[in-house]
Image (cartoon, rainbow, N blue to C red):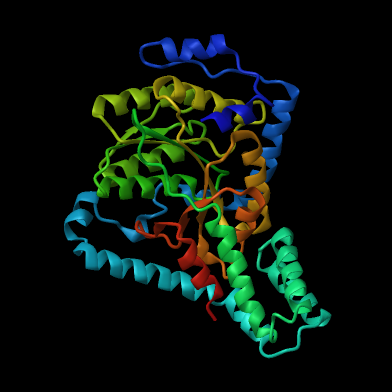
Amino acid sequence: MALFWRKRKQVQTADDATEEAVVSEEGGDGEAPEGGDDAACAVAEGLSAAAQVVDAEAERERVGEEAATEPASAADLAEGGGGQAGGEERRRGLFARLRRALGRGLGGKLAALLGRRKIDEALLEELETLLISSDLGVDTTLDILDTVRERASRNELADASAIRELIRDHLTTTLEGVEAPLTLAAEPGPAILIVIGVNGSGKTTTIGKLAFRLVRDGKGVVIAAADTYRAAAAEQLVVWGERAECTVVRKEAGADPAAVVFDALAQAKKEGADVVIIDTAGRLHTETNLMEELAKIARVASRQVPDAPHEVLLVLDATTGQNAVQQAELFHRYTGLTGLVLTKLDGTAKGGIVVGITHRLKVPVKLIGIGEGVEDLRDFDAGAFIDALMSS
């Protein structure tokens, strides 16, 4: 992926000879490179600092996090899913839950604030506070206020209630302008998805749920457990692999993540798999260069599959608000994200974080998590999301 490489040139300090040793050995077993230049280490320290925001939630990703949901196997769901009508009913139910959660936020607050009030500076100040507190972000808020002032000066807004439709149109344009589906096919295959994110964001669980869904939809999936610094991550993926009935490639704790990826790609070709999902470390030790490791993983993938990686997805916890925006900016600066996954949207009544990040980075949200159930990871639908966000 060209964008990934262009951004990596700013901080790349890889030792190609070391990397060649990793991928040339038959088993793919090599030693992880050590060190890195000062700029790269500074990046790693910045990522580590960002990760501390949600470190208290890291234990949520331990093995057994999803035990309460007790999902059936992929084969069981495929056979007993209730057909097309049942799937449509589940979709309505899922977005109804999202609407109930988000309806307590922006839509309800706008209805209470605007009413039939006169449009004046006092109202606009209150509106500014409301929009920013809903995690829409300063840039989006100022754009909306500028539009309101401009149209009000031309007498195009009858009263304050018309502002609500203006906001809806603005948010819809923002999200639909960058909306894009998840890339799940490549020629030649398999499609390579690298998933990144800090500990506690729901990254490992998201990978498990995505694999489960893809297998249910008839795709062959291999998971690369390349977060070798946290044993619980690999163990959790093994459990998900058993549930999804897909292969999980892992190595001993502390192994070179790129070696895990190399072996996973070899296994995927052997099986004729359609998709390889690569888990990566959420946070590394202070002496390890996270950005260099991600670049090395991408290079190993591209040598095996042209144009890989096909997706670089960042998983973010929606409940962390503006901290999620900061994390997204940092990762995007060095990796060239292709998509975002917003988890725990059922745990926040704001929801505006989706718009704030999209407006700031121009990167599409591709998946959302709205619950702990195995089917609560859904493709992002901008129209449905806006309907839920703006409901009162």
Q: Residue at x 41, y 73 (%)?
A: 96
Q: Is residue 118 left or right of residue 244?
A: right
Residue 163: % across, % down: 66, 78
Q: Is residue 98 above or below residue 156?
A: above
Q: Is residue 125 left or right of residue 43?
A: right
Residue 197: % across, % down: 55, 43
Q: Residue at x 35, y 71 (%)?
A: 92
Q: Residue at x 24, y 45 (%)?
A: 218
Q: Is residue 254 visible?
A: no
Residue 4 location, quadrant: top right
Residue 98: % across, % down: 46, 69
Q: Is residue 132 left or right of residue 382?
A: right
Name the foreground residue: 298 vs 387.
Answer: 387
- Mark count: 0
Q: Residue at x 41, y 60 (%)?
A: 372
Q: Is residue 16 visible?
A: yes
Q: Is residue 350 above or below residue 243?
A: below
